[in-house]
Amino acid sequence: MGILDGKAAVVTGAGRGIGKGHALQLAKAGASVVVNDIDEAVAAEVAAEIEALGGKAIGNTGNVGDKSGANSIVSACVEAFGKIDIMMANAGIARDRTFLKMSEEDFDAVINIHVKGTFLCHQGAALQMKAQGTGGCLISTVSAAHFGNFGQTNYAGAKGAIASMTYTMALELARYGIRVNAISPSGTTRMSDTYVGPDGKKHPMPYIDPELNGPVLAYLCSDEANYISGQIFGTGGERISLLSQPRYGHTLIMPGGWTIEGVQNNFKSNLGNKLEPIGITKPPYPFAEGINPPEPK
């Protein structure tokens, strides 16, 4: 018996890397899987691999960034397996450039696939789950890049948006028995080759098996996890991390409201020494000496 026996799942961007790992692990846990990828050949290969393991799977090439495409992915799951219980919105692309060199096309492409694609796939799946009356599980994909990462304004912004969408969807969909969570996965893939450190240079990364995200994913999609919603987890390798929810931190109160002079007299001594480090690697706060324009040439 698998923890997901009888469940029907979709994994978008499942032809390679982390998405492939998700599809394999969900199938090994007992789910029937729609393997979605724009590359028809690799989607078919993963579906065949699942079937060779004794599971059920079909390949699918629906475009997540288009409403009709996203809806067709959901329909394919219902037609093949009679329902949909799990939507794993994993599809993504990278168009890394530093902020001043990033084109509008680079920005739009990433936002369309990550943010709009997650929205469309989750909405289509949730509407079907509501109609079924069976509840279900939506899983989004975020990234530590949304903490801030050099050369990824578009990607980091997309992942931050998906995190906020996750919290909101969880609040709205609970009444229908639909849980919404997100994972921030790790794994060695083609996209990980784009990693740039705080120094602005590419760095090699240790190999992490993309399938190691799967056990946490399978648990979150199972009935055992019916109490978990609106949460984000770091997964992969040897870790399971619960990300802290956004919240207001250190706060100053001035009766009657603040004046400029009041801010001048109180900010640096009470908040200036508590400013947070930023970025994936969380180095010491980098702007303590001020941020100034370049010296005139």
Image: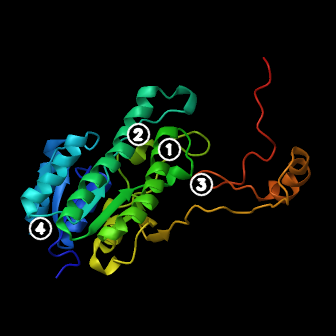
* Earlier residue among tags 2 and 3: 2
**Position of residue 59 measured from the top left corner of the image (x, y, whole percent):** 13, 51
Badge number at residue 111? 2
Label 2 vs label 3, nearer the camera: 2
Q: Are marks 1 and 2 in contact (CB under 8 Å)?
A: yes
The residue tagged with tag 2: helix, strand or loop? helix
**Position of residue 188 measured from the top left corner of the image (x, y, whole percent):** 38, 54
The residue tagged with tag 1: helix, strand or loop? helix
Q: Residue at coordinates 23% horizontally, 60% vertically from top-left? A: 23
Q: Are marks 2 and 3 in contact (CB under 8 Å)?
A: no
Q: Are marks 4 and 3 in contact (CB under 8 Å)?
A: no
**Figure check: 151 above or below 240:** above
Q: Residue at coordinates 64% horizontally, 51% vertically from top-left? A: 278
Residue under numbered circle 3: 281
Q: How many marks?
A: 4
Label 4 vs label 2, nearer the camera: 2
* Earlier residue among tags 4 and 2: 4
The colour scheme of the drawn protein is rainbow
The residues tagged by marks 3 and 1 sit, at their Cα atoms, a distance apart of: 17 Å
Residue 178's quadrant in the figure?
Answer: bottom left
Residue under numbered circle 1: 157
Badge number at residue 53? 4
Relative depth, front residue between 287 and 230: 230
